[in-house]
Image (tube, helix red, strand yellow):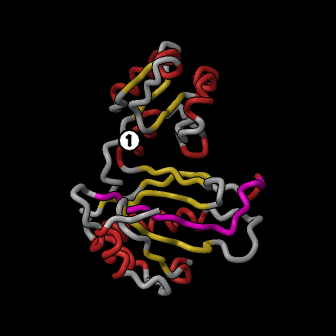
Amino acid sequence: MKHGKKYVEAAKAVDRMKLYDPDEAIGLVKKLSSAKFDETIETHIRTGCDGRHADQQIRGAVVLPHGTGKTVRVLVFAKGAKADEATAAGADFVGAEELIPKIQNDGWLDFDVVVATPDMMGVVGRLGRVLGPKGLMPNPKSGTVTMDVTKAIADIKAGKVEYRLDKTNIIHVPIGKASFTQEQLEDNFNTLIGAINKARPAAVKGQYLRSVTLASTMGPGVKVNTLKLV
């Protein structure tokens, strides 16, 4: 993959052989984000888990103290009083069966998170092929299948992020924007790492956090010293 001039220049400032302390890595990533838009800063965590085994799966969610800097659009599948509750709680879209053809046939996906009450999961299940590959399927582990739709919506709007292993056993999570202060990014990063350490499956042997890299949308990756994250 060929990188642009800005990326090449920024990459020169990163010592590829060095493992940076978390605060130093965050400062460097912030400094090297030079795009014309407010870049997202992401954490990429390579784990010692083998996601092919059910007892080594990692999936959960955590509310970042300073949010992600992104406006999150929430779709809630609910009926009756729960639908009214979702609307009152600030859901961007609320509906039931009538949304199925809109999503399935018309390709409507103008939302970032899907919440559903348990009784609606039979309906939502019909959208598995569309929502599943995009990581939008509601899940009890991430708190998106719940009767407490008010809390679910409040948490998501406040900066709740989901973390899960991808096929290569890496977790990718945004921790904020380049415009955030150093302290805000550090708080968010530490909160995320704390949650992932807590989610360590008992079946994982040896080193759990194999590598942790921070990078902005257009910038080079900066490796973090995992010994400082235990």
Residue 8 part of the magenta segment: no
Report the magenta residues as a range.
39-53
Is residue 159 in view from this perspective?
Answer: yes
Name the quadrant containing residue 122: top right
Number of numbered markers: 1
Q: Is residue 43 above or below residue 92?
A: below
**Left/right of residue 112 with respect to residue 9 in the rendered view:** right
SS at badge 1 = helix
Q: Is residue 119 above or below residue 71?
A: above
Pick the front one: 47 or 120:
47
- Residue at left 45%, top 65%? 191
- Residue at left 47%, top 86%? 18
Location of residue 184 in the rendering, given as x and y in whole percent from the top left corner: 31, 66
- Residue at left 43%, top 29%? 109
- For disc 1, the neighbor class at 10 Å (few under 14, some 14 to 19, many from 20) is some
- Residue at left 62%, top 22%? 126
**Left/right of residue 59 with respect to residue 42 in the rendered view:** right
**Left/right of residue 21 with respect to residue 122 in the rendered view:** left
Pick the front one: 221 or 120:
221
Residue picked out by circle 1: 154
Location of residue 217 in the rendering, given as x and y in whole percent from the top left corner: 37, 59
In the picture as drawn, the residue positioned furthest to the top comes out as 98
Q: Is residue 228 above or below residue 30?
A: below
Name the quadrant containing residue 46: bottom right
Pick the front one: 89 or 157:
157
Is residue 23 in view from this perspective?
Answer: no
Location of residue 83 in the rendering, given as x and y in whole percent from the top left corner: 43, 21
Residue 41 part of the magenta segment: yes
Location of residue 218 in the rendering, given as x and y in whole percent from the top left corner: 35, 62
Disc 1 marks a residue whose amino acid type is Ala
